[in-house]
């Protein structure tokens, strides 16, 4: 069985482009046959709490001697890590909120990025080395080079750093811009571009799901 872990974090359950793209990927993945499975974790419907204790940043052997991590918090972290390690492919819906990633997604990242467990530190630990990961990041505006918002994207870079550099997964990024063109009148002139980028990102997601 080949397993896809689908992570969604959008607060919009109806019109979310990130959800639409991760759904298209998951559907194409399942269409490959009965040996393909999907595990879904919706961080908006069932939020992961913020870390209950700073010691959870580390495995037990590297924690302070007086660390007292709540048992339920430890169990949740182990569940999230096991879920990730069991996945052959990861897809993350990461819409840009206020130029950064949703706080629900950041909480998940804080739980699964553990030096010495999912990333190296005191020992070489790269259990996810080379596994495919797809980051889907819709953005309300345009972040074209030379535009007023050039360099304001603080959603994709930290995910590339954690998932790609620290966890050493093989990352593909799919972005779609100007998602606000449908609802914000001053951006209406960009609707055609917004639709084209969305359709292109969804088509690329489907193609990736059939290849990875």
Image (tube, rainbow, N blue to C red):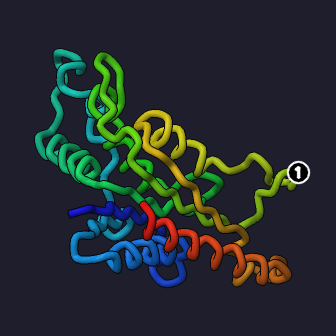
Instruction: Give 131 or 92, whichever is nearer the viewer.
Output: 131
Is 123 on the left or on the right of 28, as rendered?
left
The quarter of the displayed image where residue 192 is located: bottom right
Is 11 on the left or on the right of 186, as rendered?
left
Residue tagged 1: 146
Report the quarter where the C terminus lies. bottom left
Is 65 on the left or on the right of 92, as rendered?
left
Q: As displayed, is residue 126 above or below residue 14? A: above
Instruction: Give 17 or 91, whichever is nearer the viewer.
Output: 91
The quarter of the displayed image where residue 74 is located: top left
The x and y percentages for residue 51 are 31, 42
The x and y percentages for residue 34 are 22, 76
Question: Residue at coordinates 74% horizontally, 79% vertically from top-left?
Answer: 181
The x and y percentages for residue 77 are 23, 44
The x and y percentages for residue 3 are 27, 62
Instruction: Give 29 or 23, whichever is nearer the viewer.
Output: 29
Crowd tier of the residue under label 1, counting other residues whose Cα lies within 10 Å: few below 14, some 14–19, many 20 or above: few
Question: Residue at coordinates 37% horizontally, 38% vertically from top-left?
Answer: 129
The quarter of the displayed image where residue 69 is located: top left
Is 77 on the left or on the right of 4, as rendered?
left
């Amino acid at each position: 069985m080949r397993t896809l872990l689908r992570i969604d974090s959008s607060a919009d359950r109806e019109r979310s482009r990130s959800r639409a793209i991760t759904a298209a990927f998951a559907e194409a993945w399942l269409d490959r046959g009965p040996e393909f499975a999907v595990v879904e974790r919706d961080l908006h419907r069932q939020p992961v709490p913020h870390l209950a204790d700073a010691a959870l940043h580390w495995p037990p052997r590297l924690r302070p001697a007086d660390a007292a991590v709540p048992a339920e918090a430890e169990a949740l972290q182990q569940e999230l890590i096991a879920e990730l390690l069991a996945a052959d492919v990861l897809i993350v819906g990461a819409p840009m909120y206020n130029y950064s990633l949703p706080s629900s997604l950041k909480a998940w990242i804080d739980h699964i990025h553990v030096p010495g467990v999912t990333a190296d530190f005191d020992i070489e630990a790269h259990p996810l080395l080379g596994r495919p990961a797809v980051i889907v990041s819709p953005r309300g505006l345009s972040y074209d080079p030379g535009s007023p918002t050039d360099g304001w994207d603080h959603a994709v870079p930290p995910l590339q750093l954690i998932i790609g550099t620290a966890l050493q997964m093989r990352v593909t990024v799919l972005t779609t811009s100007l998602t606000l063109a449908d609802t914000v009148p001053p951006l209406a002139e960009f609707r055609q571009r917004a639709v084209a980028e969305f359709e292109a990102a969804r088509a690329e997601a489907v193609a990736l799901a059939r290849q990875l």
